[in-house]
Image (cartoon, rainbow, N blue to C red):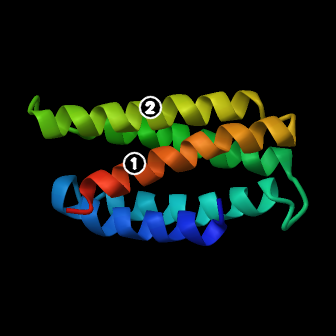
Amino acid sequence: MKPSAILFAAAVFAAAASAVAAPRLRPIMRDWKAQAGQAERMLTGAVPYDEPALRRILTGMIGDARDVEAGISGSGAQALDAKNRFSRFEADAAATLQTAAAPGGASARFQRVAGDCRSCHDALRN
């Protein structure tokens, strides 16, 4: 996946999510957009691989996802869907973190994280 696709998806989600979730998502999405781009560049070899930096990125994303999930109120279908999406994102980021020592494995796992981002953007676009 191209870094620009991740960055575009993050921008779309930030705009769409504001209508569905708390405004506090905007700064998180901006951070994730920058971090996803940095991770993607490392994992594609565009810049040197930096395992500690990747670990910091993923650890931050995991913590943010937990916070967002915990902050989603309501029990309606839309709230449950959002909670499930952030839970899946958190789990996939944690699985990627477990593979951070091996750039090839981390790259493959990170594609799931990027896919989680795309799924939210696709769902919230309308």
Amino acid type, mark 1: Ser
Q: CA distance from mark 1 to mark 2?
A: 11 Å
With 102 as the anchor, is 11 left or right in this view? Answer: left
Residue 16: image quadrant is: bottom left
Q: Residue 116: x percent and y percent? A: 47, 44
User: Is residue 82 among what the camera can see?
Assistant: yes
Q: Residue 12: x percent and y percent? A: 37, 68
**Which label's residue is closer to the chain start, 1 or 2?**
2
Which label sits on residue 93? none
Q: Residue 8: x percent and y percent? A: 48, 71
Q: Residue at x 46, y 51 (%)?
A: 117
Per the image, the residue denoted by label 2 is: 88
With 1 as the anchor, is 51 left or right in this view? Answer: right
Give the vertical position of 110 relative to 47 (above or below).
above
Q: Residue at x 18, y 54 (%)?
A: 20
Q: Residue at x 22, y 54 (%)?
A: 22
Give the vertical position of 72 relative to 38 (above or below).
above
User: Is residue 73 among what the camera can see?
Assistant: no
Could you tell me which secondary element the residue under label 2 belongs to? helix
How packed mark 2 is, by other alpha carbons closer than 10 Å (few <14, some 14-19, many 20 or more), is: some
Per the image, the residue denoted by label 1 is: 119
Q: Residue at x 17, y 37 (%)?
A: 79
- Quadrant position of the C terminus in the picture: bottom left
Q: How many numbered markers are drawn? A: 2
Frontmost of labels 1 and 2 is 1
Amino acid type, mark 2: Arg
How packed mark 1 is, by other alpha carbons closer than 10 Å (few <14, some 14-19, many 20 or more), is: some
- Quadrant position of the N terminus in the picture: bottom right
Could you tell me which secondary element the residue under label 1 belongs to? helix
